[in-house]
Amino acid sequence: MARDKRVERLPKKAYETELFRLQGELVKLQEWVRAEGVRVVVAFEGRDAAGKGSTIKRVSEYLNPRLARIAALPAPTERERSQWYFQRYIEQFPAAGEIVLFDRSWYNRAGVERVMGFCSKEEYMRFLHQCPIFERLLVEDGILLRKYWFSVSDREQELRFRSRLQDPMRRWKLSPMDLESISRWEEYSRAKDEMFLYTDIPEAPWYVVESEDKRRARVNMIAHLLSTMPYHEVRRVPLELPPRPPSTGYRRTPREMQTFVPDHADALTGQPAPEPAAKPSGKSAGKPAGKRSGKIAHVGKAR
């Protein structure tokens, strides 16, 4: 059901200032993970349009993509359906010095698969039995596992769905499955409650993120994640730029012998931009790119 009280939106300036500070701490966390060989897994779960994806973007924005990966798995293949359920998720797990952020995780079975009937009752009950055991094994092996549930009201979810419908840049975020969640709101609520009953264990507890205001959700989640990690600032080797050696006579290749990307940006200042270079063919294929055409295209205003 919709919540009665609207959450006050965190002011933009306060949000941006704190977010940037927290992102700096995430960089320190990453360096500690790398230096100490730590393995970190963070699972992001919750309602459709609850703000998981945008929070993951803020978490990973300044991190090294070679050390911090986002795992957003598609629907399983026929071969994967024949495997042990957790198997394809294990393949995404970190090695020493890595962080993996799961944009939805093995909890698909307790959520969408359960509600939409994509798994049998036996498979679902087996998951509820095995999941706590599976997570205890991960923690016992030294993986730092954190699980976040992003909570949003039905009213706010519908507002976000409508916003996506009207925005061509974000319409891809909506699928028939997402819209189905509106009519199955209470079913998803019951599934979430049962999932928590079985999987909110001391070794790997669930942390609920209130996500009526996305700004608050992002800084609250990141601040909490950092507070649960025993990281410290790693001392780095100081770096200095070496002096440039004297020239040995190298000369750059003449511009007319290379194919340059047209200066589209120049059109944004009101200046004409050259038309894209034609694809080489026939006799012109061997000519320098700059001599194939002397025409200049005048680009109009963007619409």
Image (cartoon, helix red, strand yellow):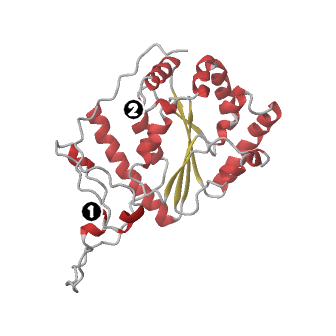
Q: Which residue is mark 2?
A: 216
> x and y percent of residue 49 in the render?
50, 29
Q: Secondary structure at mark 2?
A: helix
268 up-or-down from 28: above or below: above
| Disc 1 crowd, CA 10 A, few/some/many (<14, 14-19, 20+) | some
Image point (63%, 46%), residue name = 203
Front-lying residue, 21 or 258: 258
Q: Nearer the viewer, mark 2 or mark 1?
A: 1
Spatial CA span between label 2 and label 1: 53 Å
Front-lying residue, 45 or 207: 45
> x and y percent of residue 63 in the render?
42, 54
276 up-or-down from 9: above or below: below
Contact between marks 2 and 1 (CB within 8 A): the answer is no
Q: Quadrant of the N terminus?
A: top right
Left or right of residue 28: residue 145: right
| Disc 2 crowd, CA 10 A, few/some/many (<14, 14-19, 20+) | some
**Residue 287 shows in the view:** yes
**Residue 209 shows in the view:** no
- The outermost residue toward the top is 4
229 up-or-down from 249: above or below: above
Image point (29%, 72%), residue name = 239
- The outermost residue toward the bottom is 248
User: What amino acid is labelled 1 in the image?
Assistant: Gly
Dot 2 or dot 1, earlier in sequence? 2
> x and y percent of residue 192 in the render?
64, 28
Q: Which residue is mark 1?
A: 290
